Image (cartoon, rainbow, N blue to C red):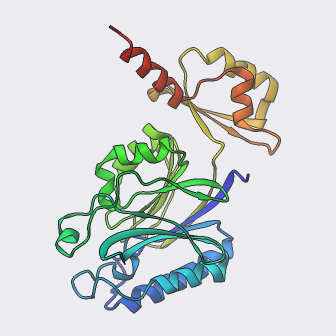
Amino acid sequence: MVRKVRVATVSMAQEFRKARKRKDNLNYLAKKVKEISLFKPDIIALPEVFPLAGLMEEEEILGPGKELFLDLAKRYRVHLVGSLFEEREGNLYNTGLVANREGEIIGYYDKMHPFRKEIEKGVIPGKKDQLPIETEFGKIGIQICFDANWPESWQKQVANGAELIIFPSAFPGGRILESIALLNQVYIVSAVWSLNSGIIDNTGRWLVKTDRFAWSVWSTVDLDRTVFHWDFQEEKIKEIGRKYGNKIKVESFGLEHLFALEPNSSEISIPKVIREYGLITYREYIKQATVAQNNVK
């Protein structure tokens, strides 16, 4: 399975754009996806309810958008992720859709925590037991906008195998996303209405951000990058350095007492190195501590 994934994200650039109709947003996104396709991304993230960004009060909540979404995925041979309002079985949801390179829906996620105005428009919360979506790269999760205020939803996605979570949103999220990425050791790709879309690595650091000159950005992320706690593992890292040299990148985060391992060579598999040296990941270390605490009588 390919572990390096080229990820792109789009902002709606509301600070500069003055969309008046749904078609303005759809035309803009069609143009941006075409531009980004030149960099051969594997995944492109679009913002929350992208047909209606900035138009919630002016346009009908249901309408065109899904057809274009699927067409763009197929035309540019890319996985596309974004959210729109969708009616199913008589219920209205804010739904994050994942399309594959053939323009087929391979999974979806219904926003679990719609905000008050959405509820007033008839949107209902998604089910609590929603799982990540399987792709050719592994499992990806989706969390939408207001969901950022319920970190347990993100934890469940990661616990069920999500290594990258797409965040279509109206608001940027900022340090909330940084903390979620770090504490869950998960990559987050935010696609928002303002000039604040970007990609956060699994130690909570922004790799790229959109700005007033670049309304879309991309980066290659390595899903083999793994985060560890330094406790009782310093000597093992020295041994790894002596054997593998610059084939493995070791990055330390002293204030957090963490380090990350990332392969610098196609010959290296971090899971194999973990088994070889008996390393304990940060996630496993916290799990072991939790079990020990719960066993105290």
Apparent side of residue 189 relative to residue 118 in the rendered image (left or right): right
Which quadrant does the C terminus fall into? Answer: top left
In front: 47, or 252?
A: 47
Is residue 194 in view? no
Q: Is residue 222 above or below residue 262?
A: below
In front: 209, or 166?
A: 166
Q: Is residue 281 above or below residue 192?
A: above
Q: Is residue 269 above or below residue 135?
A: above
Q: Residue at x 31, y 63 (%)?
A: 171
User: Which of the 4 image quarters holds residue 73?
Assistant: bottom right
On the image, the x and y values in percent for residue 179 come to: 39, 42
Residue positioned most to the front: 89
Residue positioned most to the top: 297
Is residue 188 in view? yes
Q: Residue at x 26, y 80 (%)?
A: 56
On the image, the x and y values in percent for residue 271 come to: 70, 34
* Count of numbered tags: 0
Q: Residue at x 50, y 54 (%)?
A: 132
On the image, the x and y values in percent for residue 263 come to: 72, 40
In front: 8, or 283?
A: 283
User: Which of the 4 image quarters holds residue 276?
Assistant: top right
User: Which of the 4 image quarters holds residue 80?
Assistant: bottom right
